[in-house]
């Protein structure tokens, strides 16, 4: 190491492990940091930037650190300030691009910058009406998502047909109709001088590519780039990054292909995985020491990824093998429940037990696959008298008591800072005048919620007091105002309810992963190997959110009294084996026990499972072409629709429902979705007589589900 890097700057590297230190001390790019969950990647890159600044290698005003959420950017700025590098720009892609667009638009285009369109749905509804395309709110949301995907994939309306030919059409529209809708939406935006969030990136990239003056000025401004969560960049973001670089190689990227969970938005890990090919001289540092989770949690996460064998057309890069740096903890638990209500009640009971034994509610999270699952957990926690916060609900800094607290702190900071108190003591003193007290109120409801908000501010003051030297009340108020601008809220007391996608980047002492059954994890519409791989990665992200305690659960039925047809997720099978658990208990209907093959059966051609190839001997399994242990492949919603239709149809015919079609046959119908007589005859259990008797109403029922309009 050169003399220029010696001296006080070296102290920034104190406390880093060998791999983190290697990353932080490599100041010249290109550098690729492959960082597993909980391995301290933010610590490594913030110390790298601070080290470069304090060593005089980086001008802090010419460093741009880019990440994907305003919260992560605010956290990075806060850490850099604490490390003595306050001038570094840490922004999201959109925030950095918008700032440049606002500056250069008058110079390059002239006039006012188009207004940003917050929601696409209203404009899309108008565009659809002009084209006489029938829509509802759900289909409009799907169209909006497809436009976002097309734009981040750099597909124009003209290029959409070729670029999306292998992609499923949104909301049942054909590709040609959607391309026309996409163009009509773009025309309306232009007529009204509007732009959407994707346009911010597109327009900025376009300016940099078309105007050499703009490119030269931006490239002069920023000399060093750091990109966090690089596995989640889209083609459009990569295009913008390359324009910022202008052929230079002063780039540090950080990511983990095993945490790629946003492919549906256009994100791709390809740029991370091909980094060495694009930059042959790049340094690569692997961070695998996990400081977040216990060995028991880490081992389960490693097993989940290792269970997916590489091969086939779907790429599966070798995952990082995490090594826990923490002492041993409790073994993860896997439980099964009769229905969703029972599962939620069981989780609420366990949360109460954790709280009674000392785990703070803010250190507990319940994570699930879809937002629609939250209601059962909200009800169960409320019934148990346990406070919770629904991630994505009312914004923390929008609450009346928080606005009141910031105003009081601002006034106090302007009066005097000569009291000699720490910032935390000053904040406690100010907030005690508007309702905060050291002891939480015993009541629930609004009083408790107000106290929790104020307590979160006190907790943040205590945390920053420890992290920052010579910290002042005025600096604390400035920190709150900056956090308010980007909605970087402090932790509120209460169990967190969140989807797995929204939990990315967060961590808790105890994590409940709920609803781990086929149809939810993996989700029903995950059909291809790439889609199933992403579901596996999503569960991996969920597991690695847990620091100490991990609970996985599933429910056999949606509602109390249901038939319990759900199966536990295929992803849980290797985890059960690791924990020494047998196969989940199954209810076997009379006459469906496993029978041994006799000599005659062996001589006949055996029926085999389409999933695993096992020989089938039970009648219903032979009809389904699936053994008891393999996950169903049918559309669960269509299956329930057909069961409802069969009940009504059988009532009209005054016969028992099973005399029309068996459940096994309905499963095959829900899997293959036949809409012609020829296709119906391909289904085991349906012959010409069945088609003649019930074919027309059956086809109508299937069509009604596939095309509700």
Image (spheres, rainbow, N blue to C red):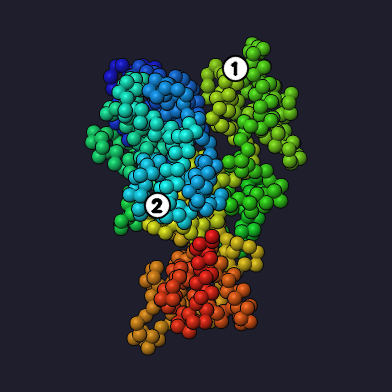
Task: Residue 23 in the image: state x and y as whole percent.
Answer: 35, 31
Residue drawn at point x = 34 percent, y = 82 percent: 605
Q: Quadrant of residue 496?
A: top right
- Residue nearer the viewer, 319 or 499: 499
Split into 4 quadrants, where in the image is the N terminus? top left
Q: Which residue reaches farthest bottom?
A: 600
Residue closer to the observer: 611 or 68: 68
The answer to whether 107 appears left or right of 430 in the picture is: left
Query: Splitting the image into 4 quarters, where does residue 416 fall?
Result: top right
Image coords of residue 236 (percent x, y): 37, 37
The residue depicted at 58 percent of the width and 71 percent of the height is 645
Helix, strand or loop at mark 2: helix
- Residue 204 or residue 635, whichever sits in front: 204
| Residue at the far right in the pictured view | 443
Q: Position of residue 136 (x, y in %)?
A: 55, 51
Whole-angstrom CA distance, mark 2 to mark 1, is: 58 Å
**Earlier sequence position, callout 2 versus callout 1:** 2
Query: Which quadrant would residue 553 be assigned to in this image?
Result: bottom right
Q: Which residue is mark 1?
A: 474
Q: Nearer the viewer, mark 2 or mark 1?
A: 2
* Label total for image: 2
Q: Circle 2 sits on which residue?
A: 176
Which residue is at a point 58% across and 52% down the rendered structure image? 372
């Amino acid at each position: 190491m050169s003399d220029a890097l010696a001296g006080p700057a070296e102290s920034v590297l104190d406390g880093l492990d060998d791999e983190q230190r290697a990353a932080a001390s490599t100041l010249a790019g290109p550098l690729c940091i492959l960082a597993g969950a909980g391995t301290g990647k933010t610590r490594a890159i913030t110390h790298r930037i601070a080290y470069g600044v304090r060593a005089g290698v980086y001008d802090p005003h010419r460093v741009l650190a880019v990440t994907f959420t305003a919260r992560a950017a605010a956290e990075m700025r806060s850490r850099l300030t604490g490390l003595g590098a306050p001038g570094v720009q840490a922004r999201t892609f959109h925030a950095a691009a918008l700032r440049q667009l606002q500056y250069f638009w008058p110079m390059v285009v002239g006039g006012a910058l188009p207004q940003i369109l917050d929601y696409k749905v209203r404009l899309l509804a108008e565009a659809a009406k002009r084209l006489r395309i029938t829509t509802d709110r759900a289909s409009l949301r799907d169209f909006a998502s497809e436009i976002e995907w097309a734009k981040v994939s750099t597909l124009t309306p003209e290029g959409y047909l070729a670029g999306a030919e292998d992609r499923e059409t949104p909301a049942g529209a054909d590709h040609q109709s959607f391309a026309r809708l996409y163009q009509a939406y773009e025309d309306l935006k232009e007529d009204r001088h509007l732009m959407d969030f994707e346009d911010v990136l597109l327009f900025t990239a376009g300016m940099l590519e078309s105007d050499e003056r703009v490119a030269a000025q931006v490239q002069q401004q920023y000399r060093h780039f750091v990109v966090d969560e690089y596995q989640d960049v889209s083609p459009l973001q990569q295009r913008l990054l390359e324009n910022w670089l202008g052929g230079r190689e002063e780039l540090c990227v950080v990511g983990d292909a095993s945490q790629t969970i946003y492919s549906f938005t256009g994100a791709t890990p390809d740029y991370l995985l091909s980094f060495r090919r694009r930059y042959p001289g790049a340094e690569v540092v692997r961070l695998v020491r996990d400081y977040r989770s216990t060995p028991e949690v880490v081992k389960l996460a490693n097993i989940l990824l290792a269970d997916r064998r590489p091969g086939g057309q779907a790429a599966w890069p070798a995952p990082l093998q995490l090594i826990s740096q923490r002492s041993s903890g409790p073994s993860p638990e896997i439980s099964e429940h009769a229905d969703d209500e029972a599962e939620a009640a069981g989780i609420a009971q366990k949360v109460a037990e954790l709280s009674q034994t000392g785990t703070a509610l803010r250190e507990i999270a319940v994570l699930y696959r879809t937002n629609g699952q939250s209601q059962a957990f909200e009800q169960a926690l409320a019934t148990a008298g346990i406070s919770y916060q629904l991630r994505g609900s009312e914004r923390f800094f929008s609450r009346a008591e928080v606005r009141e607290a910031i105003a009081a702190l601002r006034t106090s900071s302007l009066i005097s800072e000569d009291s000699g108190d720490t910032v935390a003591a000053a904040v406690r003193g100010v907030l005690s005048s508007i309702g905060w007290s050291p002891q939480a109120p015993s009541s629930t409801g609004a009083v408790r919620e107000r106290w929790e908000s104020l307590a979160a501010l006190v907790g943040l003051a205590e945390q920053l007091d420890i992290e920052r030297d010579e910290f002042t009340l005025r600096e604390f108020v400035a920190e709150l105002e900056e956090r308010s601008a980007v909605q970087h809220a402090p932790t509120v007391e209460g169990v967190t309810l969140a989807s797995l996608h929204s939990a990315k980047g967060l961590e808790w002492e105890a994590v409940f992963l709920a609803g781990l059954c086929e149809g939810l994890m993996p989700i029903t519409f995950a059909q291809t190997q790439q889609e199933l791989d992403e579901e596996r990665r999503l569960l991996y992200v969920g597991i690695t959110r847990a620091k100490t305690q991990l609970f996985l659960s599933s429910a056999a039925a949606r509602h109390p009294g249901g038939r319990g047809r759900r199966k536990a997720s295929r992803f849980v099978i290797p985890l059960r084996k690791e924990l020494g658990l047998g196969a989940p208990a199954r209810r076997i209907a009379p006459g469906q026990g496993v029978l041994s093959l006799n000599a005659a059966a062996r001589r006949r051609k055996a029926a085999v499972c389409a999933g695993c190839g096992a020989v089938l001997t039970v009648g219903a399994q032979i009809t389904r072409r699936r053994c008891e242990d393999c996950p169903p492949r049918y559309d669960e919603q269509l299956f329930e629709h057909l069961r409802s239709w069969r009940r009504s149809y059988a009532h009209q015919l005054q016969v028992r429902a099973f005399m029309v079609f068996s459940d096994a046959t309905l499963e095959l119908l829900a899997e293959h979705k036949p809409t012609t007589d020829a296709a119906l005859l391909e289904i085991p259990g349906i012959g010409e007589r069945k088609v003649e008797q019930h074919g027309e109403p059956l086809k109508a029922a299937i069509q009604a589900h596939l095309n509700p309009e």
